[in-house]
Amino acid sequence: MQPTSSLLTFVSMLCITGLRPAACKADLLSCRLWAEPQMPVFSMNGDFEIGGIFSIHIYTRSEKNTYARQPLQPQCSGSINLRGLRFARAMEFTIHEINNRTDLLPGITLGYQIHDSCSEVPMAVKVAFQFANGMEPFYNETDSCSKSAAAAVPALIGDSSSTPSMSMARLLGLFGIPQVSHYATCACLSDKLQYPSFLRTVPSDYHQATALARMVKHFGWTWIGAVRSDTDYGNYGMASFLKAAQEEGICVEYSESYYRTQPRSKLERVANVIRRSTARVIVTFLAASDIKFIFEELTRQPPPPLQWIGSETWIIDPDILRFNMCAGAIGFGIPRSVIPGLREFLLDLSPAQALKSPLLTEFWESSFSCSLKGSSGGARECDGSEDIRALQNAYTDTSQLRITNMVYKATYAIAHAIHGVICRPNDTQCDKSPKFTPWQILDQLKKVNFTTKNGFQVSFDSSGDPVAVYELINWQVKKDGGLEIVAVGHYDSFRPRGQEFSMSRAISWMGGQTEVPRSVCSESCPPGTRKAVQKGKPVCCFDCIPCAEGQISNKTDALNCLRCPPEFWPNIQRDSCLPKPVEFLSWDDTLSIILTAFSIIGAFIAVCVTAVFYKHRTSPIVRANNSELSFLLLFSLTLCFLCSLTFIGRPSEWSCMLRHTAFGITFVLCISCVLGKTVVVLMAFRATLPGSNAMKWFGPPQQRLSVLTFTLIQVLICVIWLTTAPPLPFKNLKYYKERIILECALGSAIGFWAVLGYIGFLALLCFILAFLARKLPDNFNEAKFITFSMLIFCAVWVTFIPAYVSSPGKFTVAVEIFAILASSFGLIICIFAPKCFIIVFRPEQNTKKKLMGKVPSKAL
């Protein structure tokens, strides 16, 4: 607002309230009111008069200010708010009840001045000035234009709305005049720096906003609409709710505001937003007078069924029950109460009594559509048959005394505060004469702590607020099709988190359904997925993305997936981690059974060959091929076949060390024997040449020593390997993501390749020597067979190396077993099969003569 505008507005306000600072002079009768004071709608004289201000009408006559002449004084217009009238008369009733008591303010008669604020700020401010200064048109002061320190009223009750109450509280706070509101719920009024003398018997909207947010969360609604009154009550209340909703993870599709005096285009726009929305739940912080317009507009073109969540201003208003589209609405209301004697007081009204008050006259005439005798109404004259007890409206309905009880409590609180200032303990009469200031009443108000006749506790905290307790209200359909207000539970803000709600009966939801309606932007993400927010939309609008490989989510609407521990892997649904299956070449595996069968068959063949050779150990063909080395070779081949069995089964410390060392030593023993046989063939041929004594240097002792030496070298390599870094069981987690490969880690790769390299060295050496002896006479050597066997051996192990490195899991061990069996079968078949064939099937060739007869003469 511009400075000039602010100044004009201030001047206008002074004119409306009747103040004229420029008229102040130093002489007698120097200060006067310009305007006529606002007369109370109800009043009664007493020793001390309590002020009251209620929203009995909801409009004032307005005109455009020209700032060229004095504006007209505000006047209420429109129909009577019957609840506001009931509040005002409840204050009357309470003061009469207090005056009839002997234990509270004995000997003191309380009076009252009750005004109508018309729900407008200008009227509330004007009345506030009157409460501070009184209504005398002249101030008889000789030295200043200020009145005495005493205010016109020691305290007041009201207003019914937050915005007028805020304007009054700022003014009255300057004078320390206590203001106890029965219905102003804006959380901003708890700020004692701005409103030091404001208290209330109704809970702050902060508690209601928090309760509404928790209720929305409790029923699983994450996608809602929001509509508020464009007033301090609506704006502050909705701001508190939106903050609490954000903390609860609730998203708001839209947030609209409306005030009853705004253009119709704004009302239509709000209604269209509600119709087009996808949210099925609407949270409202609306005054009853504002929401009526919205409901009336929505009935023109009804939207899909909606779940209305109401603030206490309209959810407990019986006048709104006529809108059937709100069936199933829920919200929080002040707890119901019973005030004994109030109904009789309200109904104790006759035409003659109504004529004594313009407000009651208006009420009577509007209720019965007639004109009282002596009034200026133009309708038919009331004939005396009118029965106020037959009326069914908000004035006569005392079944839902909620805010009315707040008026009752506020009046008693002020009475107790006055009692604490002017009465001494055990006095039967209180002193009417003592002078006191509003600050003293305010100080006593902050300390009051009592229980009313109808059983309600009254006290204020440091912010001037009471304990926040609500009833959970539900609009349910009656048998006749109408709606009724039903309390279905309670909410206590002082209970531990999660225990605030207590339900007493079932809730009837929108459309009469019994299931809780759904209102979400996106359906919940099941376990096994995570939420991914949709670009440009609120966090409640999301896509469900399956967890990545190796990750899980075990709860609904997980923001992130969790990676399973190294030895675990997700199940198919990816909502839990299961131990990874451990893979190794087990005994019951089909591949293991096949390899075991070949191993046993190979060992059995070796034993059979040994038996054949032993049985025919004196035959020329056995003796001619060095029977001692042959038996040692057959023994080592038997061990080679059997050592492959150590590679099958679950790896353990002993099996890992045994399998590699047994394999290395037995194969070196085997190759050493073949190497010895090769050398014997070469030496035997040279020994047959004239003048050669080669066999003298490689006789049986040297053959045994060579085999022992070659084998001991391998034993030494294995001992060094086992003592420095032996092979041990190892869980390989890297090769496969979804399972564990249980294998034998080499420990020292150098040791493993040294063992393998030594075998390869001996095999290559044997192959070279056998290759050199391949053209010796057939009858005296087996060099050709050894050459073929070494060729097979080398081919197998050369192929084994890349296959071993690239084979996955248990197939690595299978390749190693296959290499052992293939090379062993190559040796036994190439070296011993021809001899066994001759021994068994061609015995006529197993003679010395036959063998010697084939030797060429040049070779002899």
Image (cartoon, rainbow, N blue to C red):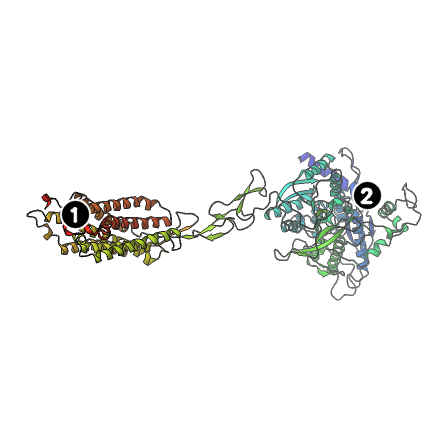
Q: Nearer the viewer, residue 242 or 123?
A: 242
What percent of the width, then of the height, locates residue 95? 80, 56
Q: Nearer the viewer, residue 652 or 168?
A: 652
Q: Which label number is shown at residue 79?
A: 2
Q: Amino acid at mark 2?
A: Ser
The residue sitting at the front extreme is 844
Mark 1 or 2 closer to N-term? Answer: 2
Labels 1 and 2 touching (C-beta < 8 A): no
Quadrant in the picture for the N terminus: top right
Is residue 725 among the parts visible in the rendering?
no
Viewer-nearest of labels 1 and 2? 1
Q: Is residue 707 left or right of residue 294?
A: left
Q: Which label number is shown at residue 779?
A: 1
Is residue 846 among the parts visible in the rendering?
yes
Q: Is residue 614 left or right of residue 3?
A: left
Q: Amino acid at mark 1?
A: Asn
Could you give the CA–CA distance between mark 1 and mark 2, rounded to whole angstroms?
136 Å
Task: Give the SS element for disc 2.
Answer: strand
Q: Which label number is shown at residue 555?
A: none
Crowd tier of the residue under label 2, counting other residues whose Cα lies within 10 Å: few below 14, some 14–19, many 20 or above: few
